[in-house]
Image (tube, grey):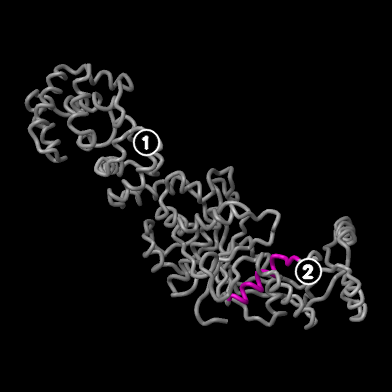
Amino acid sequence: MSAKIRVRFAPSPTGYLHVGGARTALFNWLFARQNGGVFVLRIEDTDLDRSTAESEEGLLRDLRWLGLDWDEGPGIGGPHGPYRQSQRLEIYKKAAHLLVEKGRAYPCFCPEEILEAKRRKAEAEGLPHHYDGTCKRLSREEVKRRIASGEQYAVRMTVPRKDAVLEDLIRGHVEWKAETLGDFIIMRSNGMPVYNFCVVVDDSDMEITHVIRGDDHLTNTHRQLIIYEAMEKPLPLFAHVSMILGSDKTKLSKRHGTTSVGQYAIDGYLPEGMVNFLALLGWSEGNDKELYTRDELVAGFSLGRIGKSAAVFDPVKLSWMNGTHIRQLSPERLAELVAPVLRQAWPQDQRLSDPAFLSKAALLLQNHLEVLKEAPTLLATTLQGGPPENDEAAAALKFPGVDALYAAFLDELGRIEWKREAINEALKAAGKKTSMKGKGLFMPIRVKLTGNCHGPDLGLIIDLLGLEEVRRRLELV
């Protein structure tokens, strides 16, 4: 086993990157980065019927979006490749052959229909079903003869009659009784390896020191411990992380809302917000801190602070956390992020090609956004204007002296150098001229410009629109 910490994330490309898988990848990445280790990405695509190139590309894209860069794996390579299981079939066959040669596994010629009949009989009798060892009792000569004749066979692992024990870094002491498991298949008769065998061969070859994964894999560990022992390979340390639940405390699924990392990216969540949120699903630094930068997560993360209890996915908290990270962006960076969203909403609006206009729009939006996709809704009345949206807004346009207020304000705006501070001073000056203050000063101007009584800072709105557009809207009958 390598002295350097090596961890891996090994998704199957049969669908999108689920937030649970992303959390597992993040924990592995944080552990590697904190310890100066290696983060390996391995694609487990031996399910040829369900694995697709599109799904793999989506997984890679979503990991890159989260900023979880891998040190070895697809697109990078490394000393332990290939990193796709579909390209490692000969490696699995050689490993299985070696186990047969050592007497730790054996060819099994039993047809599937016979095995299925035995399973049904055991179930009907209420008995646990284990393979009865029919092929294990075959002589070497009989095995050679049947193989030479071209008879198809699986490779079945010999399970030792002893309990298996695991000291898990999160779950603690875990034990499996010998009688709970019979001899199991590691290579199918069609030549394809089974999941548990591939995992052990790969993790051994890739010198993985720590296996950090969801606790839905805990049941697989019994078989994997047996394979490690038979292969005479050192065990990695295991850390099984509790699952993520929905608000109703059932396993997180589509019925709880979005579970795809890619969809969150499309909806305008920041990778910084998503990483922060995922890190706190099951891990805590031991204090009340909730907002973390990526560097702070790397510095504070430890496997010992991962709890045993399942974490609950709270989309409201995710949105709040994402909004907080949005407010930490520079206006220039936020402008870059909201520009495509705004241009999609208003493709004909030439103002959205102006970097200065976009920076002002970002400043206006920054304290109000939770996700980027909200930008068009929040900015709509400012960019488009329009009649009063409700009775309250309509009433604001009937305040006594509003026409004089508009004229005084435009006169003041014409005297200033166009800066936000000067705009606010012009507002105050117009109020003094017309004896308007408070609601009577700000509300009629806001409603005339946007049709709405409420929204972002009025000075920011005016600065964004510019003098000519403000003049056009205030003079509009």
Crowding near the residue tagged with mark 1, few <14, some 14–19, many ≥20 C-alpha atoms within 10 Å:
some
| Type of amino acid under label 2 | Phe
Is residue 33 shown above or below 242?
Answer: below
Point out which mark residue 189 bears.
none
Q: Position of residue 35 (x, y in %)?
A: 44, 74
Q: Position of residue 119 (x, y in %)?
A: 86, 59
Q: Quadrant of residue 407?
A: top left
Residue 473 in magenta stretch: no
Name the residue at 87% across, 72% down. 133
Disc 1 target residue? 376
Point out which mark residue 184 bears.
2
Q: CA distance from mark 2 to mark 1?
A: 57 Å
Q: Quadrant of residue 157?
A: bottom right
Label 2 element class:
loop
Q: How many marks?
A: 2
Is residue 421 shown above or below 86?
Answer: above
Q: Earlier in the sequence, mark 2 or mark 1?
A: 2
- Stretch of the chain drawn in magenta: 192-206
